[in-house]
Image (cartoon, grey):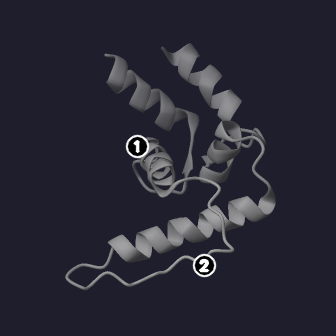
Amino acid sequence: MKSVAASLYNFLDHDQNGKVNFKELLLKIYPNLAPPHLITIDRWCEEYTATFSLKGRARPNRRQDDSKKRVLPKACLARFREMFSFYDNDRKGYIVLLDMQKVLGEVCS
């Protein structure tokens, strides 16, 4: 299992710096995303976090401008964020090989 985790990790670690961040994960899944798309996705993640981290408050009303088109649906984006967070247990903002090996070892054992 360690060799599978290492192979998958090397594929995801685009710049081979030993860390996989959310941007690298998105670019591997959607290789045609342009820099403006990534900026938009980052903004959506921030808005999503801000919206759903409000406890006991009414949810802010955010209307989407018709001129803005979503690159990824909200549900898909939320799933990617959850998947990334699954591997990034200590919330560093990136995944290292040890994180991936640990999670895959727990799931497959």
Give the camera-side residue of 40 and 24.
40
Q: Which label was assigned to residue 52?
A: none
Horizontally, residue 77 falls left or right of residue 55, namely: right
Residue pictured at 31% horizontal, 16% vertical: 109
SS label for mark 1 = helix
Label 2 crowd bin: few (<14), some (14–19), many (20+), radius 10 Å? few
Q: Position of residue 9 (x, y in %)?
A: 62, 30
Residue 52 appearing in the image: yes
- Residue at the outermost front position: 66
- Residue at the outermost left position: 56
SS label for mark 2 = loop
When asked about the image quadrant of residue 12, the answer is top right
Residue pictured at 46% horizontal, 47% vertical: 88
Residue pictured at 50% horizontal, 47% vertical: 80
Instruction: For marks 1 and 2, give the CA distance.
Output: 32 Å
Horizontally, residue 104 falls left or right of residue 45, namely: left
Nearer the observer: mark 1 or 2; the answer is 2
Query: Label 1 sits on what residue type?
Result: Phe
Q: Which label was assigned to residue 86?
A: 1
Q: Position of residue 93 (x, y in %)?
A: 54, 57
Horizontally, residue 28 falls left or right of residue 59, namely: right
Q: Position of residue 103 (x, y in %)?
A: 40, 31
Q: Position of residue 8 (x, y in %)?
A: 61, 25
Residue 19 appearing in the image: no
Mark 2 and mark 1 in contact (Cβ < 8 Å)?
no
Horizontally, residue 81 falls left or right of residue 53, namely: right
Q: Which label was assigned to residue 65?
A: 2
When asked about the image quadrant of residue 19, the answer is top right
Give the camera-side residue of 83 and 32.
32
Give the camera-side residue of 104 and 77.
77
Query: Label 2 sits on what residue type?
Result: Asp
